[in-house]
Image (spheres, rainbow, N blue to C red):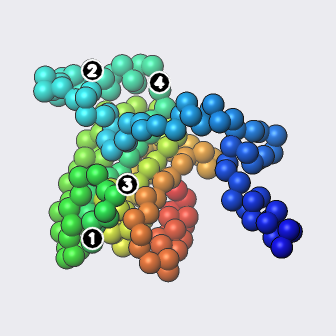
Amino acid sequence: MREMDTMSKSAIQPPALRRTSNMRVSEEFLAKYNRPGPRYTSYPTAPVWQDDFGPENLKAAYRRANEAATPVSLYMHIPFCESLCLFCACNVSIQHDKIVALPYLDALRREIDTVSQSVSQSRPIVQFHWGGGTPTYLSPSQLEDLFEWTRARFTFLPTRKSASKLTRASPPVSIWRLFADSASTASV
């Protein structure tokens, strides 16, 4: 019984007392950072949006970024879900009929065309993120087609430095594996 008590204590030991490699997390550190923070739901975040930012401002922003030769991060938003997650605060559209995605995908391709004309080909894509809703609302072939459409219009790094985030919104594991396989085939 004594041995079991010792094992139980070590199994439920708080993270601040556990050693991970050579790092030790103090109670003070936890107290400092264990508090609510801003929730990332859009970029730029809502307080940054301005009603007076128009097309000319956007063109100027593209021009400045091209002149600075900054790398590019892309975010592909798929706003659809089949059901609403109780924790979700994102702007999503609950749809069971997946045909609703087709006009959205057409509009997204037009947006990709428009943005790619303003982004210098000398600026590499260093991050590529999927989000939503959930990208798994789309079929693997739709995901692959959308990624290939994007890759044909932007300069992706030749190495695997491009990151891809598939936001998982609780689809069955077998379906998730299918999507992960599709994404890895598309070299995301």
Is residue 102 in sight in this rendering? no
User: Closer to the N terminus: mark 1 or mark 2?
Assistant: 2
Q: Are marks 4 and 1 in contact (CB under 8 Å)?
A: no
Separation of disc 4 and disc 1 at Cα?
41 Å
**Dot 2 or dot 4, earlier in sequence:** 2
Q: Which mark is residue 168?
A: none
Query: Which disc is residue 83 wearing?
Result: 1
What kind of element bears circle 2?
helix
Q: CA distance from mark 3 to mark 4?
A: 26 Å
Q: Nearer the viewer, mark 1 or mark 2?
A: 1
- Which numbered disc covers residue 60? 2
Along the viewing direction, whichever of 75 and 153 lies nearer the viewer: 75
Q: Residue at x 19, y 76 (%)?
A: 97
Q: Which badge, 1 or 3, comes first in the chain's sequence?
A: 1
Classify mark 1: helix, strand or loop. Answer: loop
Q: Quadrant of residue 181?
A: bottom right
Which label sits in the foreground, 3 or 2? 3
Q: Give x and y (percent) for residue 171.
A: 41, 73
Amino acid on which disc 4 is placed: Ala
Give the residue number, with chain letter if any, for mark 4: 69
Label 3 element class: strand
Q: Secondary structure at mark 4?
A: loop
Q: Nearer the viewer, mark 3 or mark 4?
A: 3
Q: Where is 106 relative to 138, above or below?
A: above
The disc at residue 131 is 3
How packed mark 4 is, by other alpha carbons closer than 10 Å (few <14, some 14-19, many 20 or more), is some
